[in-house]
Image: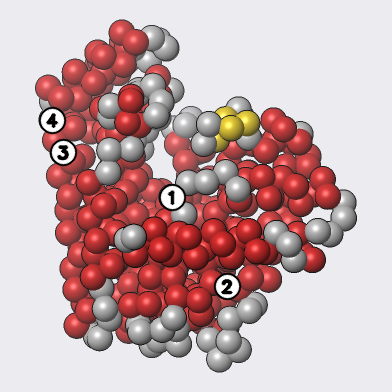
């Protein structure tokens, strides 16, 4: 069993045990059932595992970071409930979304309650480190909201720069990975230098992760990705692939602007290859991964045991879905 599988199992067991606690059995059940539903959907559990790994990297037992792991996973799922409402998404992880099952109003309220419960999880950390944990958690929560708003704003803006896109994905995706790691450091009663190093590792890894997602959406193998490729192309989503292509060949994007067809997907993908958009984004993905590993090396130099984190990072880098 790998370290990731072991920590996934530890976290999932704690989730299942928690469903028997009073906080999950309050009334009305219609408020809490959607929370149990989305937390039970599955997924990689990457964020809570990072919190547990960070604690172990400092020589502590992974269990000390369970409050942090639950806080980041509850916050993440709160944001997913609300994102699905804003995107009018019918399916998440192959299952009906919360708002399509319980209705929009209940989904909003249940998500809000899940955010409060994230803070309740965080409150279980030792009093000595709670101020630092709250600082990074609150900062991250605001940044995730800012990233989501930028993402929505970009849908109606024509002139988005690469730097704006990079800031958006850092806030929407990367900062929560950094937060998960930093909370794990504080849970293990580490110091600010280690917290900063592992936060940087998570930030750069998350940025590389999101660029990889953009590539897989367009160029992944449908049998491995688990969905039809080209969704971002069909919706004219302003990924880095899109921005690079627009800088080189604005004419082809204009030609296919209003189309929603497999012909559009193939035409845009071919153009992205021909003008070097795919190669450029891949080079940026690799560059941010290397920055992540440099940050991890800095943490190792400060006494961190980074082998498991390095293996996880490599798995993330090489994934096909």
Residue 250 position in % (x across, y down): 25, 21
Residue 101 position in % (x across, y down): 72, 32
**Pointer 2: residues within 10 angstroms few (<14), some, or many (20+)?**
many
Mark 3 and mark 2: Cα distance apart in space? 40 Å
What residue is rendered at 32% in x and 31% in y?
224
Name the mark on residue 280.
3
**Pointer 3: residues within 10 angstroms few (<14), some, or many (20+)?**
some
Name the image colouring: secondary structure
Which element carries disc 1, helix, strand or loop? loop
From the image, state whether disc 3 or disc 1 is nearer to you: 1
Q: Are marks 2 and 1 in contact (CB under 8 Å)?
A: no
Q: Which residue is mark 4?
A: 276
Which element carries disc 3, helix, strand or loop? helix
**Pointer 1: residues within 10 angstroms few (<14), some, or many (20+)?**
few
Q: Which residue is mark 2?
A: 67
What residue is rendered at 47% in x and 54% in y?
45
Q: Which residue is mark 1?
A: 44
Residue 146 position in % (x across, y down): 52, 53
């Amino acid at each position: 069993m790998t370290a990731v599988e072991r920590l996934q199992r530890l976290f999932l067991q704690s989730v299942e045990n928690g469903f028997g606690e009073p906080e999950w059995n309050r009334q009305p059940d219609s408020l809490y059932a959607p929370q149990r539903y989305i937390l039970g959907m599955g997924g990689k559990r990457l964020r809570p595992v990072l919190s547990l790994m960070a604690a172990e990297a400092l020589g502590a037992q992974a269990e000390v970071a369970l409050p942090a792991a639950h806080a980041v996973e509850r916050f993440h799922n709160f944001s997913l409930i609300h994102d699905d409402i804003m995107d009018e998404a019918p399916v998440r992880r192959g299952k009906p979304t919360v708002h399509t099952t319980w209705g929009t109003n209940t989904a909003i309220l249940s998500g809000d309650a899940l955010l409060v419960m994230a803070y309740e999880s965080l409150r279980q950390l030792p009093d000595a480190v709670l101020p630092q944990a709250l600082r990074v958690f609150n900062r991250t929560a605001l940044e995730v909201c800012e990233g989501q708003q930028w993402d929505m704003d970009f849908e109606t803006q024509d002139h988005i720069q690469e730097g704006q896109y990079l800031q958006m994905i850092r806030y929407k995706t990367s900062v929560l990975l950094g937060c998960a790691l930093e909370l794990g450091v504080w849970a293990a009663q580490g110091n600010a230098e280690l917290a900063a190093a592992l936060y940087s590792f998570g930030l750069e890894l998350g940025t590389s992760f999101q660029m990889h997602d953009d590539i897989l959406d367009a160029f992944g193998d449908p049998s491995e990705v688990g969905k039809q490729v080209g969704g971002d192309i069909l919706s004219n989503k302003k990924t880095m692939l899109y921005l690079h292509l627009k800088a080189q060949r604005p004419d082809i994007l204009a030609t296919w602007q209003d189309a929603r067809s497999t012909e559009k997907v193939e035409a845009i993908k071919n153009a992205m290859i021909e003008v070097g958009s795919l190669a450029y984004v891949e080079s940026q993905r690799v560059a941010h991964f290397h920055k992540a590993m440099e940050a991890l090396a800095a943490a190792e130099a400060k006494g961190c045991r980074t082998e498991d984190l390095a293996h996880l990072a490599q798995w993330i880098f090489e994934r096909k879905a």
